[in-house]
Image (cartoon, rainbow, N blue to C red):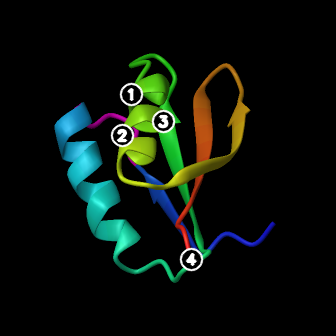
């Protein structure tokens, strides 16, 4: 898997994090993947999945450990 961009948004509010993710996606090429690192304590993972899917992106992969969630979101072609 090739990740084109990584964005660590741990500690941010959902709205600040989604603004940063939206800006980061502008730099991802078609079929590119944005890796978002989320704070597991804030539990924004499901909200970010819905946010991405509502914009036409797809969830490529999800990796969790006790401290964080790594969400890989694919930009459509």
Instruction: Residue under label 2, please give it.
Output: 51
Q: Position of residue 4 (x, y in %)?
A: 60, 75
Task: Say whether disc 3 or disc 4 marks the residue closer to the N-terminus.
Answer: 3
Q: Which residue occupies 45% across, 44% down?
A: 53
Would you name the residue on which mark 4 appears? 77
Local crowd size for mark 3, using a 10 Å CA cut-off: few (<14), some (14–19), many (≥20):
some
Q: Residue shown at 72%/36% (left/top)?
A: 63
The alpha-carbon separation of the residues under discs 2 and 4 comes to 18 Å
How far apart marks 3 and 2 lie (CA) works out to 5 Å
Q: CB atoms at circles 3 and 1 under 8 Å apart?
A: yes
State left or right for residue 52 relative to residue 14. Answer: right
Could you tell which of marks 1 and 4 lies nearer the N-terminus? 1
Q: CA distance from mark 1 to mark 4?
A: 23 Å
Marks 3 and 4, how far apart at CA: 19 Å
Q: In screen coordinates, is 73 left or right of 61? A: left
Q: Which residues are magenta?
A: 9-13
Picture quarter containing residue 48? top left
Residue farthest to the right?
Answer: 1
- The residue to which callout 3 is attached is 49
Which one is in front, 75 or 44? 75
- Contact between labelled residues 2 and 3, with CB atoms less than 8 Å apart: yes
Q: Is residue 31 left or right of residue 51?
A: right
In percent of width and height, residue 11 lies at 33, 34
Contact? badges 1 and 2 (CB < 8 Å): yes
Quadrant of the rendering where the C terminus is positioned: bottom right
The secondary structure type at the circle numbered 1 is helix
What distance separates the C-alpha of mark 1 from that of mark 2?
6 Å
Q: Which of the 4 quarters of the picture holds residue 14? A: top left
Q: Are marks 2 and 4 in contact (CB under 8 Å)?
A: no
Please give the residue where the numbered disc 1 appears in the rendered image: 47
Prevalent SS, magenta region = loop
Given this view, does label 1 or label 4 mark the residue nearer the observer?
Answer: 4
């Amino acid at each position: 898997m090739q990740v084109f961009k990584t964005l660590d948004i741990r500690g941010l509010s959902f709205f600040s994090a989604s603004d940063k993710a939206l800006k980061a996606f502008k730099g991802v090429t078609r079929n590119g993947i944005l890796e978002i690192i989320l704070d597991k304590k804030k539990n924004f993972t499901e909200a970010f999945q819905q946010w991405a899917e509502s914009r036409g992106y797809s969830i490529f992969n999800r990796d969790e450990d006790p401290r964080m969630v790594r969400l890989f979101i694919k930009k459509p072609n």
